Image (cartoon, grey):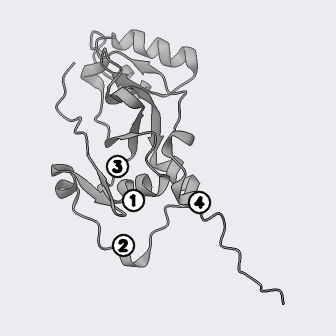
């Protein structure tokens, strides 16, 4: 007797790691790099955004070409950067990152390797392409308020995640 089992897709897919889909081609610039030079770097590689990293490669924020061009010509990348929503290790499952994006309402996550060195960026659109940001009916209204989620560590889908605040970091 042959049983027919409905196709539920790859059951291991939620355990795929964010390092597999993070944009590793995003350029990295120093917070002390002049805005004019940062724009030149972005143009040279054909990118619209860069991660701002400190001397150890730790992500501090992100900066767009438009933001750099709109600011004072003598500004530095660190003065024009926006904070990153969260910093996660490349081994975090995609399902956890998707839940965190929904819970915090952030647009981008910096992805780091061991030693907290930046290896890329993961945008909400990347996660949306991965799973359509499946909003489960039982979790739509159970998200913590944004301010509550940033105050301490978060627990998402049973996994404890230490949030790394990046706001207020000056170059």
Disc on res. 106: 3
In this picture, is 112 found above or below 106?
Answer: above
In this picture, is 33 found above or below 115?
Answer: above
Q: In which quarter of the image is residue 8?
A: bottom right
Mark 3 or 4: the one toward you? 4
Q: Name the residue under label 2.
A: 139
Disc on res. 12: 4
**Real-space CA distance between mark 3 and mark 4, rounded to the nearest whole angstrom:** 25 Å
In this picture, is 135 found above or below 4?
Answer: above
- Characterize the local packing of mark 1: few (<14), some (14-19) or many (20 or more) Cα atoms within 10 angstroms: many
Q: Mark 1 points at which residue?
A: 99
Mark 1 or 3: the one toward you? 1
> Mark 1: which secondary structure?
helix
> Mark 3: which secondary structure?
loop
Mark 1 or mark 4: which comes first in sequence? 4
- Characterize the local packing of mark 4: few (<14), some (14-19) or many (20 or more) Cα atoms within 10 angstroms: few
Mark 2 or mark 3: which comes first in sequence? 3
Mark 3 or mark 4: which comes first in sequence? 4
């Amino acid at each position: 007797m042959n049983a027919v089992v409905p196709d539920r897709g790859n059951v291991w897919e939620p355990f795929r790691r964010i390092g597999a889909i993070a944009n590793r081609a995003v350029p990295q610039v120093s917070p002390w790099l002049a805005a004019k030079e940062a724009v030149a770097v972005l143009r040279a590689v054909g990118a619209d955004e860069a991660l701002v990293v400190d001397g150890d490669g730790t992500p501090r924020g992100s900066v767009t070409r438009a933001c750099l061009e709109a600011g004072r010509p003598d500004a530095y990348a660190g003065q024009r950067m926006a904070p990153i929503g969260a910093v996660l290790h490349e081994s975090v499952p995609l399902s956890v990152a998707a839940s965190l994006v929904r819970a915090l309402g952030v647009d981008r996550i910096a992805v780091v390797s061991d030693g907290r060195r930046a290896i890329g960026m993961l945008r909400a659109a990347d996660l949306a392409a991965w799973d359509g940001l499946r909003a489960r009916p039982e979790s739509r209204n159970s998200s913590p308020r944004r301010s509550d989620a940033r105050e301490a560590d978060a627990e998402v889908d049973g996994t404890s995640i230490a949030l790394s605040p990046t706001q207020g970091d000056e170059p």
